[in-house]
Amino acid sequence: MFLGHYALGLAAKRASPGLSLGVLFLATQLADILWPFLLALGLEQVRIDPGNTAFTPLDFVSYPYSHSLLLLAVWGLAAGWLLARSNGRAIAVVTALVVSHWVLDAVTHRPDMPLYPGGPKVGLGLWNLVAATVAIELAMYAAGVWLYLRATRARDKRGRWGFTLLISVLLAIYIGDALSSAAPPSVGALTVVAALGGVLFPAWSWWADRHRAPVVGR
Ligand SMILES: [Zn+2]
């Protein structure tokens, strides 16, 4: 899942207006942010395998550290403590977002999502149904954007257009991915693109969010 993760980050702004959207995106995408670095270190493995499911050409051979339920709970608590240590509610929001990545991936992936390193793997395989995957993710994303727009207002043009562009770029990446059946040229290229995206989108959203103010009582 891609847009669905961002949708939850956007929706969470209302629950914790003091947290930047950058922090919320970092939390919801932490699994995918850690993943390329663990691939580069050789601790996790992926294989390019067109047709693995209808939606993705990737075979997630092993990712116990970035994508097991147990370790995401650990990373979630650690991220909550590091990013929101002064506020119990914010810690809970960050932890829940980090763990939500596992839940959403377990719905979309075939059974490759470990409960704990070396443990049983689960996955409901929504990715076998491309139209359903796209419909569900677009609906989640639209709801997330709407909730974020209700929870904040632009302070200036950067807050309005920086956010609009961010949301549009994420949408365009997703649509491009859904329409094309092209596989990445190599695991190395995939790793680099994943690492760049993991830095770019939290940083961009942190910047855009600084130019928006929380709206209370709506
Ligand atoms: Zn993931």
Image: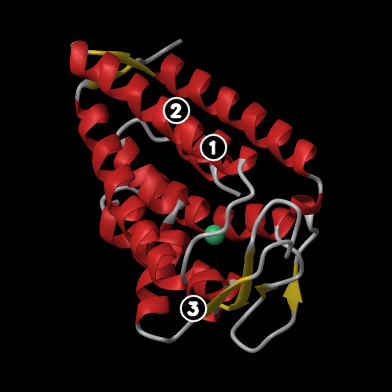
Q: Mark 3 to mark 1: distance in Å?
A: 29 Å
Foreground disc of the pair 3, 1: 1
Residue 68 in percent (x, y) is at: 58, 73
Mark closer to the chain start, 3 or 1: 3
User: Residue at point 54% right, 37% down?
Assistant: 176
Q: Classify residue 42 as left or right of residue 53.
A: left
Q: Residues within 10 Å of mark 3 (few under 14, many from 20)?
A: many
In the rendered structure, find residue 14 and report the number of the disc placed on it.
2
- Sequence order check, earlier mark of 1 and 2: 2
Which of disc 3 and disc 2 is earlier in sequence? 2
Return the residue nearer the eye: 147 or 86.
147
Please name the residue that numbered disc 1 is placed on.
176
Relative to 117, say whether 158 is above or below.
Answer: above
Q: Quadrant of residue 124?
A: bottom right
The numbered mark at residue 197 is: none
Describe the element under mark 2 as helix, strand or loop: helix
Q: Is residue 63 left or right of residue 178?
A: left
Give the SS element for disc 3: helix
Q: What kind of residue is marked 2?
A: Arg
Does the Cβ of the disc 2 residue fall within 8 Å of ligand 1? Answer: no
Q: Nearer the viewer, residue 148 or 51?
A: 51
Disc 3: which residue: 65
